[in-house]
């Protein structure tokens, strides 16, 4: 799904700003016809989570109703108009001028509605109902009662009752766009790159249109001293072509070289639509125990993180996004995983531009395999894989897809759940490695489907408390066993310790900045001795908000090496020493 763009054929208008909101705790809005517009709304910022904007909003998970008005700021003749939502957590249902547009399930991924037939020339009223309540048949799941025999018991008693370790922020989290495209304009562009021989890049381009265009496709690729065009005809609504780039300036973290690609629909000499993308020429694959970027081994240093900031919650905040890249660069990171959901689209644009390697993860965190709701959870996971790959497939920065975080795969049903999911991802994108992050280690049956084994480990924290000297040999033996069993590269996708900023101890003890720094340093030193380890992702870049629970002082997870307001702890300095010297 393309990001909206403005050029001489397309127009896009961001509807962000102050909207109206009304909470609906009795769930009576539908019966009271709020979809046609409601009274007694109060101002709310969009995009942002609603939870920290209002005192009684913090633990309220919905339903809530949003509304705004707009008129169309551009010529609409010959155009198709769409409303596109970047992320609404969790259920969304929208109406324009009282007409139902449809619904969408799942946060963090975009969805859109064509509104051409229902849009007014004058003022338009958009109403959105948002429901972020936790339920066992949603993904991520919540509100599931603890079973003393499984891991959920450690989350039982959380408030709100999440089955995952971050606050269940709700609302319209990313910009809502009104955009117009030519009637038979470009609907999708897919770019794939290869390096068939040293220094030569090949860029494959596939363009799909709205309807069947009686025209041709022209593609133009330029940058780094190269400038070339190619044309192709359409079969049905699709056209494909490719361009060769001799002496290609390849994309990598050290040299995030990007080319400009313009795709155009041509009728005679006239251009009827165009769309621009940045293209990075690179390959990524797993060979033996190595992860190869452009044929060369690459080692990942970086983090798991969250889209999380005071007051705005999980809302899109460009300044914090830019700051986070600055912090990651300062500390010497070259990569991150989008724990535990796909991040905003501009975040990936910046990764392309700044040269960060991204493991893009679906919102499938905390999956469990009890029968109730299983079919629904499975179909949602398939939907997320489709939506994520569709959205992010053209980013050179995205080097792998992660299909889940810490599924409770002890169940024999887990492998049957994951096998078709991995098959779907491979079919949609044969070019990128696949993975999931597991806390089970060698017991994770679904590692069989992965190209890289992502392991989350907290020895010295949740177990072997305060005893790093015990924890590290256990980790060492476990890693060797895991590699021995699967013979695939291993990435430690989570490790770390909570540190209360300003809390110090000598000798180091749990919750002190010293212990966090020592634990992270100890893990890294060990990982560097394992030839099959392809990277280290510390949990977490920054402290972040969680549900209330006995293990989360002040409803914060303090495993950040930076505080929630982005100040370094001792561990950030330690990482900088380790990562900057390589
Ligand atoms: C891991 C989860 C992550 C948690 C982390 C922790 O993947 O979401 O925040 O543990 O406990 O199990 O800090």
Image: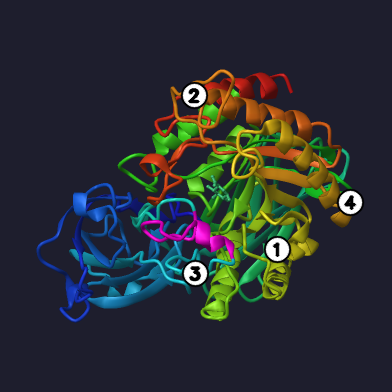
Camera-nearest label, 1 or 4: 4
Image coords of residue 394 (percent x, y): 63, 52
Placement of the C terminus among the 4 image quadrants: top right
For marks 3 and 2 on the same chain, the one whose residue lies earlier in the sequence: 3
Q: Can residue 285 be seen in this view?
A: yes
**Labelled pair 1, 2 in contact (Cβ < 8 Å):** no
For marks 4 and 2 on the same chain, the one whose residue lies earlier in the sequence: 4
Task: Tell me how far mark 3 sits from mark 4, CA to CA.
Answer: 54 Å
Reading the image, the residue beneath label 2 is 568
Q: Is residue 507 magenta?
A: no
Task: Tell me how far mark 1 sits from mark 4, CA to CA.
Answer: 43 Å
Q: How crowded is mark 1: few (under 14 residues within 10 Å), some or many (20 or more)?
A: many
Residue 145 lies, with reference to residue 300, above or below; the image says: below
Q: Residues within 10 Å of mark 4 (few under 14, many from 20)?
A: few
Reading the image, the residue beneath label 4 is 484
Boundaries of the magenta span: 150-164
Image coords of residue 178 (percent x, y): 35, 59
For marks 3 and 1 on the same chain, the one whose residue lies earlier in the sequence: 3
Q: What residue lies at 53% left-to-right and 62% top-to-bottom?
A: 152
Q: Is mark 2 on a helix, strand or loop?
A: loop
Reading the image, the residue beneath label 3 is 184
**Labelled pair 3, 1 in contact (Cβ < 8 Å):** no
Camera-nearest label, 1 or 2: 2
Q: How crowded is mark 2: few (under 14 residues within 10 Å), some or many (20 or more)?
A: some
Q: What residue lies at 44% left-to-right and 26% top-to-bottom?
A: 501
């Amino acid at each position: 799904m393309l990001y909206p763009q403005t050029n001489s054929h397309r127009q896009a208008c961001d509807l962000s700003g102050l909207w109206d909101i009304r909470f609906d705790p009795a769930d009576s809005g539908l019966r009271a016809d709020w979809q046609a517009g409601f009274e007694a709304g109060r101002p709310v910022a969009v995009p942002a989570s609603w939870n920290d904007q209002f005192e009684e909003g913090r633990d309220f998970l919905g339903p809530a109703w949003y509304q705004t008005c707009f008129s169309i700021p551009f010529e609409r003749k010959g155009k198709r108009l769409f409303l596109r939502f970047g992320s609404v957590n969790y259920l969304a249902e929208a109406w324009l001028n009282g007409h139902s547009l449809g619904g969408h399930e799942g946060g963090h991924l975009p969805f859109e509605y064509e509104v051409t037939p229902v849009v007014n020339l004058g003022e338009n009223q958009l109403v959105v109902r948002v429901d972020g309540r936790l339920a066992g048949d949603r993904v991520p799941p919540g509100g599931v009662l603890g079973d003393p025999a499984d891991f959920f018991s450690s989350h039982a008693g959380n408030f709100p009752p999440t089955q995952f370790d971050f606050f269940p922020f709700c609302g319209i989290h990313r910009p809502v766009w009104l955009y117009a495209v030519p009637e038979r304009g470009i609907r999708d562009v897919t770019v794939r790159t290869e390096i068939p021989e040293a220094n030569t890049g090949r860029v494959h381009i596939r363009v799909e249109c709205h309807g069947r265009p009686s025209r041709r496709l022209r593609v133009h690729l330029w940058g780094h001293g190269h400038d070339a065009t190619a044309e192709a005809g359409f079969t049905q609504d699709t056209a494909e072509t490719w361009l060769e780039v001799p002496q290609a300036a390849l994309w990598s973290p050290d040299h995030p070289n990007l080319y400009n690609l313009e795709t155009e629909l041509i009728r005679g000499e006239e251009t009827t639509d165009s769309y621009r993308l940045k293209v990075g020429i690179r390959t990524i694959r797993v060979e033996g125990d190595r992860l190869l970027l452009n044929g060369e081994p690459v080692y990942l240093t970086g983090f798991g993180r969250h889209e999380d900031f005071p007051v705005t919650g999980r809302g899109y905040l460009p300044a914090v996004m830019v700051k986070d890249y600055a912090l990651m660069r300062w500390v010497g990171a070259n990569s991150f995983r989008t724990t535990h959901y796909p991040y905003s689209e501009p975040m990936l644009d910046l990764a392309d531009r700044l040269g960060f390697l991204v493991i893009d993860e679906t919102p499938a965190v905390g999956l469990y395999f009890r029968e109730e709701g299983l079919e629904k959870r499975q179909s949602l996971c398939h939907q997320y894989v489709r939506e994520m790959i569709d959205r992010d497939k053209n980013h050179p920065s995205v080097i792998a897809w992660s299909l889940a975080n810490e599924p409770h795969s002890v169940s024999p049903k887990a492998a049957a759940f994951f096998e078709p999911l991995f098959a779907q991802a491979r079919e949609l994108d044969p070019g990128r490695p696949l993975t999931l992050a597991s806390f089970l280690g060698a017991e994770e049956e679904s590692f069989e489907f992965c190209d890289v084994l992502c392991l989350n480990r907290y020895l010295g924290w949740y177990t072997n408390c305060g005893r790093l000297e015990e924890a590290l040999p256990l980790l060492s033996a476990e890693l060797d066993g895991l590699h021995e069993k699967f013979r695939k590269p291993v990435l430690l996708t989570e490790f770390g310790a909570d540190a209360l900023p300003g809390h110090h101890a000598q000798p180091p003890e749990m919750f002190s900045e010293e212990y966090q720094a020592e634990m992270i340093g100890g893990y890294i030193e060990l990982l560097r001795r394992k030839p099959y380890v392809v990277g280290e992702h510390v949990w977490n870049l920054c402290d972040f908000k969680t549900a209330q629970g006995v293990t989360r002082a002040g409803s914060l997870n303090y495993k950040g090496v930076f505080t929630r307001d982005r100040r370094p702890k001792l561990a950030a300095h330690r990482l900088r020493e380790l990562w900057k010297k390589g």
